[in-house]
Image (cartoon, rainbow, N blue to C red):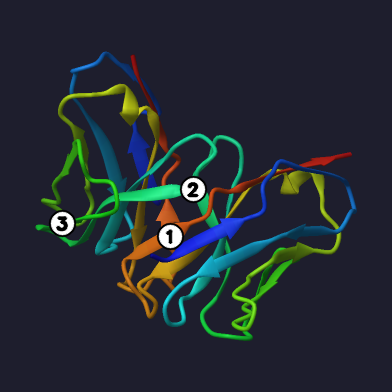
Amino acid sequence: GNSVTQMEGPVTLSEEAFLTINCTYTATGYPSLFWYVQYPGEGLQLLLKATKADDKGSNKGFEATYRKETTSFHLEKGSVQVSDSAVYFCALTEPPGGSEKLVFGKGTKLTVNP
Amino acid sequence: NAGVTQTPKFRILKIGQSMTLQCTQDMNHNYMYWYRQDPGMGLKLIYYSVGAGITDKGEVPNGYNVSRSTTEDFPLRLELAAPSQTSVYFCASSPTRSIADTQYFGPGTRLTVL
């Protein structure tokens, strides 16, 4: 079945460091891809999304590009802040093409120190 | 704007007890979802609903029941609580069928079964 694999955490960075969180997927067809963020004690919030190959999603300084050839959707940010400390989830639609269901990765916990 | 609200925030149950987790949204969304999030894992879909009176099973429905009598409410019922149901439960809603549109998540209910 369809699945999402994220890099294992936790990830600890200093403020203003560069962030990459790797995400690869296995899916039939062409799913939509998402990054969700979960701040401590809160529910998930959509961070960014991409619905077709080569699309770049971006929000709050974060970016991710839908790479069909490598089945990847890595999350990047050039300069992280303490307020970015959260758990980040990569997800895809199942089945591809706009369904009711999301498949999530296990999440990557990011801690940013001042 | 309240968005998606969940009650209670925390609950401890004994094995065999029953309870209902409440979920309400005020955005007039037709699509609603229940997920569970186990420690260190991504979210898994329990049940979903595409409108009042219509529900369907997700990936992990065993031990749960749902109903959707109104557009606003989507309660999740645990009939015979088991330790394996210890988890954080998230309710979500979406305006359309397409997951490419944003899913709005509630803050979660942390359930412990002892």
Q: What percent of the width, then of the height, locates residue B68?
A: 14, 51
Q: Disc 2 versus disc 3: distance between alpha carbons?
A: 22 Å
- Subunit of label 2: B
What residue is shown with label 1?
A: A103
What residue is shown with label 2?
A: B42
- Subunit of label 3: B
Q: Amino acid at mark 2?
A: Gly
**Residue B113: quadrant of the picture:** top left
Packing grade of label 3 (10 A; few <14, some 14-19, many >=20) is some
Residue B55's mark?
Answer: 3
Q: What percent of the width, then of the height, locates residue A60?
A: 71, 63
Can residue A94 be seen at all in this image of the molecule? yes
Q: Is residue A62 left or right of residue A37?
A: right
Co-location on one chain, circles 2 and 3? yes
State the quadrant of the C terminus of chain A: top right
Q: Amino acid at mark 3?
A: Thr
State the quadrant of the N terminus of chain A: bottom left
Q: Does dot 3 land on a helix, a strand or a loop?
A: strand
Task: Give above or below for B113 relative to A54.
Answer: above
Task: Give above or below for A63 relative to A69.
Answer: above
Closest to the observer, A112 or A31: A31
Determine the residue positioned at 61% across, 56% down: A6
Q: Amino acid at mark 1?
A: Val
Determine the residue positioned at 13% across, 47% down: B67
Residues marked 2 and 1 touching at CB (< 8 Å): yes
Q: What percent of the width, then of the height, locates residue B36?
A: 38, 42
Can residue A90 be seen at all in this image of the molecule? no
Mark 2 or mark 3: name the one nearer the start of the chain: 2
- Subunit of label 1: A
Packing grade of label 1 (10 A; few <14, some 14-19, many >=20) is many
